[in-house]
Amino acid sequence: MSDLQKRVRSTIRDVADFPKPGVLFKDITPILADFTLMSDIIDWMADTPLADSVDVVVGMESRGFFFGPGLAMKLGCAFAPARKKGKLPHATESMDYTLEYGSSTLEMHVDAFPKGARVLVVDDLLATGGTARATLDLIRKLGGDPIEACFLLELGFLNGREKLDVPVRSLTLY
């Protein structure tokens, strides 16, 4: 285990029975309070062999927004949010999906990126893969080319990466 992985694990707060009984929630807000750790995480996320070919970073609502803009700045590219239904003010495309706690809909602006844009997807957590799968499908629906999905944490026992058809990187595996 790398020093960065150890630092991430020691900083994350486990919250029992959130958002529902039986779930052990991995609270990343203590990481957000640590500038050095956040900076090191963004550096790790940007250290991909595909870095030079990324046109846009898409961050998934909501915790993907914590990492996406910083990662986009580090890579020198654009950022686009994938938001829950009804949160974006301009014309959108949408994608319905299921997740651990039910179902939802993601939306992106129809002009979030140009057709053919190479897209790196980022979020804090890969669990069952439902949100990430919907994001990849939505990117394709908008004419983008998703090239990688990057996560701070992965709950490997839920097999979410099996739903994704792009290279997947996660910093810390549980």
Image (cartoon, helix red, strand yellow):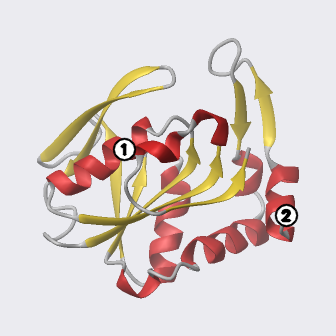
Q: Residue furthest top?
A: 21
Give the left or right position of residue 99, taking residue 125 as reference: left
Q: Foreground: 100 or 109?
A: 100
State the quadrant of the N terminus.
bottom right
Marks 1/2: CA–CA distance: 28 Å
Label 1 residue SS: helix
Look at mark 1 in the image and give the residue it sits on. Answer: 133
Look at mark 2 in the image and give the residue it sits on. Answer: 1
Establish if 60 lies above or below 105. Answer: below
Label 2 residue SS: loop
Q: Foreground: 65 or 47?
A: 47
Q: Position of residue 108 (x, y in %)?
A: 24, 49
**Residue that appears at 69% across and 73% down:** 39
Q: Residue furthest front?
A: 162
The total number of labels drawn is 2
Badge 2 density bin: few <14, some 14–19, many ≥20, Cα 10 Å: few
**As shown in the figure, which amino acid type bears the numbered disc 2?**
Met
Give the left or right position of residue 82, taking residue 39 as reference: left
Q: Position of residue 7 (x, y in %)?
A: 85, 61
Give the left or right position of residue 116, taking residue 69 as reference: left
Give the left or right position of residue 15, taking residue 125 as reference: right
Q: Earlier in the sequence, mark 1 or mark 2?
A: 2
